[in-house]
């Protein structure tokens, strides 16, 4: 694959469908975002859901109706308005390596480009913080998450902890990610991740007691991602997870005939903001 | 009692210990706030706790260390800096009708004035949104809460739903208030309260199923407030409650030797902002 130096160059490759893989480890140092694209009938309730549940649903930015190429907060994607070459410009319909399409709560298919599905009169895109940012900080502090050590996907669980309701978003559960750590390292792990307020922050709970408190069905069978062995000197540590937003949108859209789009798992949007700048936003 | 027209006049009466009763129904139309005053060692974790749990813990404003008479947001209390008469000025140590004092998680006593206990080198005051604001809006829409109809205190329950942890604030539960409503009125009640984003917003859950989801011990035995009969054509409706912050501070301060202060239940701070302006903040 062509070597890229900048998030913008990386997004160009996605636009040209020259990059369609997992973004993990690409353009190091830059933050990545979960993407969710909803019809306008769900948008206001979704924004309120994020405001009421900022830990699992940290909303970074949104597009305006009719403008899939414009975010309401330009610190995440630097747009060059003087640029005459439209192909170089950001577009949420094309700049991810891979998308999933859903309708009526059901998965339809996976595609590299959603231009022909995005309804300019209906769809609004949302960028949601991603834990990759704090994982990089943990690595720097010699607390490399085990999923990265093992080159596997992080374990994710559906819990019985419910989001605070918002409009059509009713009875939507927290999804949590789990990384095992030694008990002696917990306070350091909490301190490091605490400042990442827009990418889930510190763990919401930890220890074997937390499995029952969170209402996790079976710690050995994550609902998403890969299983991860917890060694005898380790305990499970749980963070709120951005997959919560996708699960909530699917639950809430049972009677909604419009398409819903998300990034494919691990195939994120690469932002122009650095991990070190997303800390303390 | 002297008739007062404005929140400022009301606070003067409190300052002079001429008003020491429940504030319910006083200075109609103006918003009231929960007050919590913490030592600085708990302050940063508490602010982060509020940011991570904005529905039960809607932080409105705080004082600066050393200045119990100054808030960091002047839309809630209008201060008159040109006023030479110091007695007329706002002071969080005197302007509530009644305070509770705690230490090491234990209740010490109830007083009308905390001037001699407030340590200027240690204490920081926090104002937290109060559901009185949306209750007034429900009354206007012919959906008077039953606790007001019956002139009783709202029923409050400790749940098994946990706040998202923040530093020393670990394993702190949501406290919820309950108001019974007819099933047919639920969507209207949700719509009316939704916009009160700084005073708990829409209900977090409702219906008899919610009792188990929230982990409420006994719907007929509220942990705080008065019991409230739910009629056959009604269901319980649960809102996050500001008492959550007080309970969390008590849990987190077990090993803290400084005093903690709060308003006495129902003896709130009356703000200069109107109920109608606290809506949509």
Image (cartoon, coloured by chain):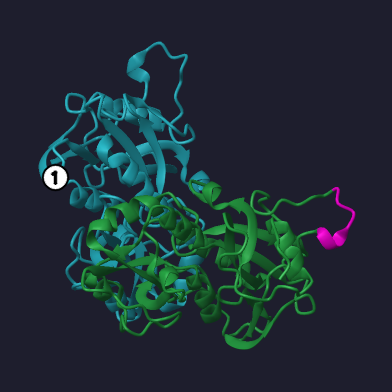
Chain colours: A cyan, B green
Q: Which of A41 and B190 is in front in this view?
A: B190
Toward which corner of the image does residue A22 lie, by quadrant?
top left
* Residue B93 in view of the camera: no
How far across and how far down the image is residue B65, in percent?
74, 64
Question: Please, is residue A172 above or below residue A115 in the view?
Answer: below
Quarter placement of the N terminus of chain A: top left
The structure residue drawn at horizontal position 34% and vertical position 67%, both measured from the top left corner, is B238
The structure residue drawn at horizontal position 34% and vertical position 60%, both measured from the top left corner, is A164
How far across and how far down the image is residue A55, in percent?
40, 57
Q: Which of B123 and B138 is in front in this view?
A: B138
The structure residue drawn at horizontal position 38% and vertical position 36%, both measured from the top left corner, is A62
* Residue A186 in view of the camera: yes
Marked residue chain, label 1: A
Q: Name the residue under label 1.
A: A255
Toward which corner of the image does residue B165 lie, by quadrant?
bottom left
Question: Please, is residue B123 above or below residue A154 in the view?
Answer: below
Residue B61 falls left or right of residue A145: right
Question: Please, is residue A214 above or below residue A21 in the view?
Answer: below
Q: Inspect the magenta stretch and tell me whether residue B84 lies in it.
A: yes
Residue B27 falls left or right of residue A107: right
Where does the magenta region start and end? B82-88
Q: How many marks?
A: 1
Looking at the rendered structure, the secondary structure element under dot 1 is loop
Q: Looking at the image, which residue sits at the far top?
A: A84
Q: Inspect the magenta stretch and tell me whether residue A110 lies in it.
A: no
Q: Nearer the viewer, residue A102 or B62?
A: B62
How far across and how far down the image is residue A261, in percent?
21, 38
Q: Looking at the image, which residue sits at the far right?
A: B84
Question: Please, is residue B252 above or below residue A174 in the view?
Answer: below
Q: How crowded is mark 1: few (under 14 residues within 10 Å), some or many (20 or more)?
A: few
How far across and how far down the image is residue B243, in percent?
50, 73
């Amino acid at each position: 694959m062509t070597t890229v130096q900048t998030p913008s160059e990386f997004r160009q490759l996605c636009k040209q469908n020259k990059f369609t893989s997992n973004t993990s480890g690409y353009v190091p140092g830059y933050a990545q975002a979960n993407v969710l694209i909803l019809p306008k009938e769900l948008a206001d309730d979704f924004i309120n859901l994020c405001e009421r549940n900022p830990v699992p649903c940290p909303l970074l930015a949104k597009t305006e109706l009719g403008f899939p190429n414009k975010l309401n907060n330009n610190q995440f994607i630097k747009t060059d308005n003087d640029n005459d070459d439209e192909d170089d410009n950001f577009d949420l319909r094309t700049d991810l390596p891979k998308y999933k399409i859903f309708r009526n709560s059901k998965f339809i298919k996976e595609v590299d480009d959603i231009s022909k599905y995005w309804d300019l009169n209906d769809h609004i895109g949302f960028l949601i913080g991603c834990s990759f940012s704090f994982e990089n900080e943990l690595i720097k502090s010699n607390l490399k998450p085990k999923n990265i050590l093992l080159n596997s996907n992080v374990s994710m669980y559906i819990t019985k902890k419910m989001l605070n309701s918002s409009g059509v978003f009713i009875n939507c559960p927290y999804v949590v990610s789990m990384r095992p750590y030694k008990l002696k390292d917990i306070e350091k792990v909490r301190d490091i991740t605490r400042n990442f307020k827009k990418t889930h922050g510190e763990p919401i709970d930890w220890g074997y007691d937390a499995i029952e408190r969170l209402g996790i069905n079976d710690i050995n069978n994550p609902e998403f991602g890969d299983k991860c062995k917890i060694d005898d000197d380790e305990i499970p540590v749980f963070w709120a997870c951005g997959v919560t937003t996708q699960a909530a949108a699917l639950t809430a859209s049972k009677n909604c005939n419009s398409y819903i789009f998300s990034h494919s798992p691990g195939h994120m949007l690469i932002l122009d903001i650095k991990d070190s700048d997303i800390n303390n936003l």
